[in-house]
Image (spheres, helix red, strand yellow):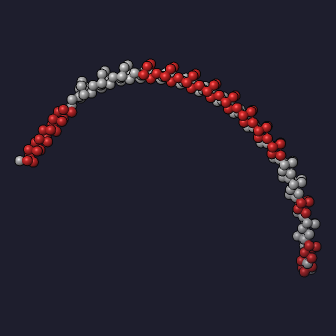
Amino acid sequence: MGTLTHCNYRDSNQLSNYRDSKPPSNYRDSNPLSNYGDFNSLSNYRESKSLSNYRDSNPLSNYRESNPLSNYRDSNPLSDYRDSNPLSNYRESNPLSNYRDSNPLSNYRDSNPLSNYRDSNPLSNYRESNPLSNYRDSNPLSSYRDSIPLSWGWIPRFGTLTAFNQGLDIFLNS
């Protein structure tokens, strides 16, 4: 019987008649994955799958038609970048737009708290009105070589060094 069991491979074997009687037989007829392009859950990719007809019914389909991001310059929250976006019309309506027109930092030398650096800034007119201005005129450290207690300190040091050098020369030359 064993011989008969293995004979007529396409008649009596459990794997025989693969396309006739096996549960997975007729791959394109009755297999759960058969007829991929006909009635499989993944079949008819462009017809009935949830992702089918990519440009027709997919949530991402018709990218420039119905996607939340579609029509980037038409209906997207970021669309029409220079038209309706909160950042659009950078030089027209953005809080930072018209940098030299209406921005808090605009017109740097006109209306900014730091504008007109040499005119109205607390640090402006560095050599005129700044607490540190006129460094060699009115600063506590100004006129370093003129009126600071440490000024002219280099002279005695230089003199001491000179005297040392002279003494060294005398010692070496004697």
Residue drawn at 65 percent across, 28 percent down? 89
**Does the rendering let one see residue 93?**
yes
Seen in the picture, residue 48 relative to 158 is either above or below; the reply is below
In the rendered view, tell whether residue 55 sits above or below residue 26.
Answer: above
Q: Is residue 59 visible?
A: no
Q: Residue at x 64, y 24 (%)?
A: 93
Q: Quadrant of residue 75?
A: top right
Q: Determine whether, in the image, residue 134 is placed left or right of residue 68.
A: left
Give me the residue at 90% from left, 75% from top: 9
Residue depicted at x 79% and y 37%: 66
Instruction: Tell me how many marks there are.
Output: 0
Image quadrant where one finds the N terminus: bottom right
Q: Position of residue 112 (x, y in %)?
A: 51, 22
Provide residue 127's location: percent of width, then percent of height: 36, 22
Left or right: where 116 falls relative to 59: left
Q: Is residue 42 left or right of residue 160?
A: right
In the image, residue 31 sits, relative to residue 119, either above or below, namely below
**Residue found at the far left of this picture:** 174
Q: Establish if 65 lies above or below 35.
A: above
> x%, y% of residue 31?
89, 59
